[in-house]
Image (tube, rainbow, N blue to C red):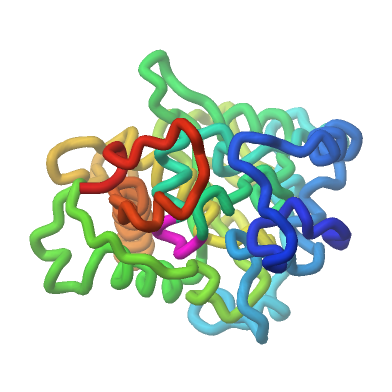
Amino acid sequence: MSDSSDESIPGTPPHRAPPRRGRYSNDLASYVKKNVNTAIAGAAQGSVASATGFSAAEGGGSGEAGVSSRDVERVKPRMLLAPGEDGRATVSDWIANPHMPKRRIVRLEWSWDMGLRHLNLNHKRNMHTLTPTLHRWFYRQDRDGKPTGWFWLPLDATPLFEMQDTFVGNEEARASYTPWMRTNARRNPNSFYNTTKFQYRLVPLPTMNSPAFSITHGTTTYAYPFTDLPPVTSRIPPHVVVVDTGRKLRQLYDSDTGAIAFEEDFAWMSDSVTRDMMTAVQRIYMAWICAWPERRWLEGGDEEDEDDDEYSD
């Protein structure tokens, strides 16, 4: 599926006005409603959008440890079936919430080296298609609003660790890390990628640990914690996934240190690199939402109700 209309995508040519934040296209809403079984094709197989927020750098891609994405089985999220599902019913939904608070979107725009009101999360590069049960668990929360299901984690560590060095700080700086430390760094996240296809693994929270719950792909059924489940391949860029996964990790581990309870909640995760990747995702997200855009950047917009003091020193 190709992205035929770039006019609703951030990063369009200068003579086209970018969409105003908080206004969403009826065409895309209709697209989701009428094509729930094919929406993910735009994220998994579609052409690359010319968007600051969503396009990836051109070139050959690599998966984990330099393995070409062409050499692995391309599994789509909708291929993962929960008990009783046959894959014929699917649900398309956003990964990063397009209706998140305005302050948070402004800070993402600043961190991602974009213009004010240029970020449009109401886009197919921010959409995955799941079977109903996995969809329900992806967005599942307890009464306190904390996630109780699962999240995506990129398989390739290299861009995540480079993002961490840029937005959080180098290893020396991270030695004294606190969740609210601020670097105010800016960089287009697409500059970290050398591929247009990305691989992700499904990481469950301990609330999914039930013998009654399993995930089937093809003829193989996988039980919690689904460590042998094949990774999925998608054109959804990692920084979009970081917005959702980082938010979930922040909600779950909001102590003074922000440390993830690996031994308690992810004891099955023996791979230190994967643990480091989860920590990096959490810290990158915190760096983004703690950013304080400069006043002169904010004054470049024309939002009538913008309050500069909410964002800058």
- x then y, percent, for residue 112: 46, 61
- Pick the residue in front: 218 or 9: 9
In the rendered image, residue 207 lying in the magenta stretch gets the answer no
Q: What residue span does the magenta drawing correspond to?
A: 110-114
Q: Residue furthest left?
A: 176
Q: Please give the name of the residue rendered at 58% of the width and 53% of the height, measured from the top-left corner.
A: 118
Magenta-highlighted stretch: main secondary structure? Answer: loop
Quadrant housing residue 72 = bottom right
- x then y, percent, for residue 228: 55, 57
Residue 172 seen = yes
- Pick the residue in front: 170 or 207: 170
Instruction: Indicate left or right for 311 with 190 as reference.
Output: left
Q: Please give the name of the residue rendered at 45% of the width and 72% of the height, measured from the top-left corner.
A: 159
Which quarter of the rendered picture does the N terminus lie within? bottom right
Quadrant housing residue 46 = bottom right
- x then y, percent, for residue 20: 63, 43
- x then y, percent, for residue 217: 72, 50
Q: How many marks?
A: 0
When the figure is inspected, residue 69 is found, relative to residue 118, above or below; the finding is: below
Q: Please give the name of the residue rendered at 36% of the width and 53% of the height, measured from the top-left corner.
A: 288
When the figure is inspected, residue 136 is found, relative to residue 109, above or below; the finding is: above
Residue 269 seen = no
Q: Please give the name of the residue rendered at 62% of the width and 27% of the height, measured from the top-left corner.
A: 136
Q: Residue furthest top?
A: 143
In the rendered image, residue 113 lying in the magenta stretch gets the answer yes
Instruction: Indicate left or right for 277 with 87 as reference.
Output: left
